[in-house]
Image (cartoon, rainbow, N blue to C red):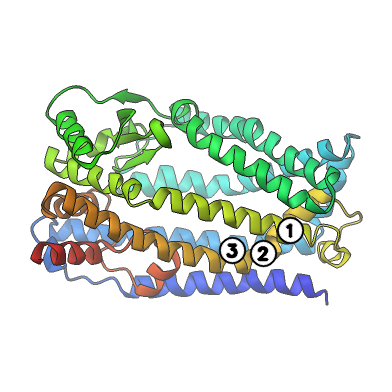
Amino acid sequence: MNIYLIIILGSMLAGFVLTTTVSQLNLHALDPALPEQFKDVFEADEYARSQAYTRAGARLDLVEEVLGIIIVPAFILLGGFNVVDMLARSFGLDSIGTGLIFFGLLFLINDLAALPLSLYRTFVLEERFGFNRTNARTFALDKLKAWVLTVAIGGPLAGMVLWFFEATGPLAWLWAWIGVTTIMIGLQYIAPVVILPLFNKFTPLPDGELRNAIEALATKTGFTLSGLFMMDGSKRSAKSNAFFTGFGKKKRIALFDTLIEQMSTEQIVGVVAHEVGHNKRGHILRMTAMGIAKTGLVLFLMSLFLDNGELFAAFGMEQVSIHAGLIFFMLLYTPVALVLGIAAQMLSRRHEFEADAFAAEATGDPEPLISALKTLSVANLSNLTPHPAYVFVHYSHPPVLARIKALHGLKGN
C-alpha cells in the first residue's frame, strides 16, 4: 500500500481518536457542583444550563468529526481529487487558471458540505440556548461576502504562489514566502478599515465615562489608540467579546455592544487593559513572527513534495501538477500541523496569563478583570471545569478558574 496514503489516512484517524477522546474526557469532567468562586454570580439553574450547552456542543462536534472521518477518506479513496482535477482541466485554461479553478471547486465542495451543520449550529443549537440573533438574510449575506473575499484575496494569493513555484526555480518557496508574508502584513492594516466593516458596523465609542476611562488607561500605559469602537456583535449573537486589531499607529480596540450592555465601566476597563497587555508585552508581534516562520517552513517542505509521483499516486491522480501538490502536501502535513498547533496553544495560554497580570498592574487592582471574567463566563455559558487534556489540545485561553486563581495570587502580593 502507498506509504503516503497510509500516513495521511493514519494521521486523520489519529486526529479523530485524539479529538473524540479528549471530548469525552471533557464531558466526564463536568462537575454539577458550582465552583465556589462563581456562587456570587451564577444561579444553580443557569450553571446547569451552561453544562447542557457544553454537552450539546460536544454532540454536534462529534457528528462533525464522524462525518469528516468518513467523507474525506472516501473522497480520497474514490478518486475525488482526480475527478475535480479533470473537471478543472476541461476549461482549457493555462496551468495557473486551472489551478485556481481546482482550488475553487474544492473550496466550494468543502463549504457546501459544511453548510448543513453550520445552519444547525446557528439556527438550532445557538437558538435553543438563547444566543442566536442571526436571521436567514444575514447568514446568507455573510456566506456570500465570505465567498467574494475568498475570490478577491485568496485567488490572487493562490495564483501568486502557483506562479512562483512554476517560474522561479529551486528558490520558489522563498519568493512565495516573501510574497505571502507581504500580503499577510498588508491585510493586518487593511482588515480593520475594509474587511471587518463588511460584516459589522463599527461606531466610534461616544464621549462619556467609559471612553474617558479607557483613554485614561491608554495614556497611563503609553498605548496610542487610532480608534475606539463599539461593534454591533448583537447582530449575530448574544455572546460578548472585545478584540484588538491593527499595527503601528493603526491600533484599534473594538468592544461588542453586548459587552457594553453587560459590564460596568470598571469591568470593561479591565478587559481593555488585558487587550492592551497583549500589545505592550509583545504578544502580537511574537505570534505574527511565529506565523511568518511557520509559513516559511510549510512552503519549504512543500517544495520538496510538489513533483512526488508516489504522493500523487496515493490520491489516484492521472497527472502531476503544482496545484494538486499544494493540497496533497497540506494533508500529508496534518500531524505536524497538529503538534505545532498544540505548541501555539500553549504559548497563547501563557500570553493570556501575562496579559492578565498586565491588566491587574495597569488598573492597580485585579478585581475588575476577575469580575469581568465571571460576567463573561456567565453570559457565554462557559464550561467552568474543562478537562486538562481538552484544554491542552483545544484551548487558546487558560480555563477561567485558572485565570481567576492567578489573579487572586497577584492580589495577595
Q: Residue furthest front?
A: 222
Residue carrying label 3: 337
Relative to 296, is 393 above or below? Answer: below
Residue carrying label 1: 302
Q: CA distance from mark 1 to mark 2?
A: 9 Å
* Quadrant into which the C terminus falls: bottom left
Residue at x 61%, y 30% (from the top left corner): 148
**Disc 1 + disc 2, Cβ < 8 Å:** yes
Q: Secondary structure at mark 2?
A: loop
Q: Earlier in the sequence, mark 1 or mark 3?
A: 1
Residue 246 visible, this orientation: no
Residue at x 47%, y 60% (from the top left corner): 61
Q: Quadrant of residue 94?
A: top right
Residue carrying label 2: 333
Residue 123, position as x, y percentages in the image:
42, 42
In front of the other: label 1 or label 3?
A: 1
Q: Quadrant of residue 65?
A: bottom right
Relative to 299, is 276 above or below? Answer: above
Residue 227, position as x, y percentages in the image:
32, 28
Classed neighbour count for the residue bearing mark 1: other residues with Cα under 10 Å, few (<14), some (14–19), many (≥20): many
Residue 294 visible, this orientation: yes
Q: Is residue 198 left or right of residue 14?
A: left
* Mark 3: amino acid: Ala
Q: Secondary structure at mark 3?
A: helix
**Disc 2 + disc 3, Cβ < 8 Å:** yes
Relative to 400, is 218 above or below? Answer: above
* Quadrant into which the N terminus falls: bottom right
Classed neighbour count for the residue bearing mark 2: other residues with Cα under 10 Å, few (<14), some (14–19), many (≥20): some
Q: Is residue 64 left or right of residue 153?
A: left
Q: Earlier in the sequence, mark 1 or mark 2?
A: 1
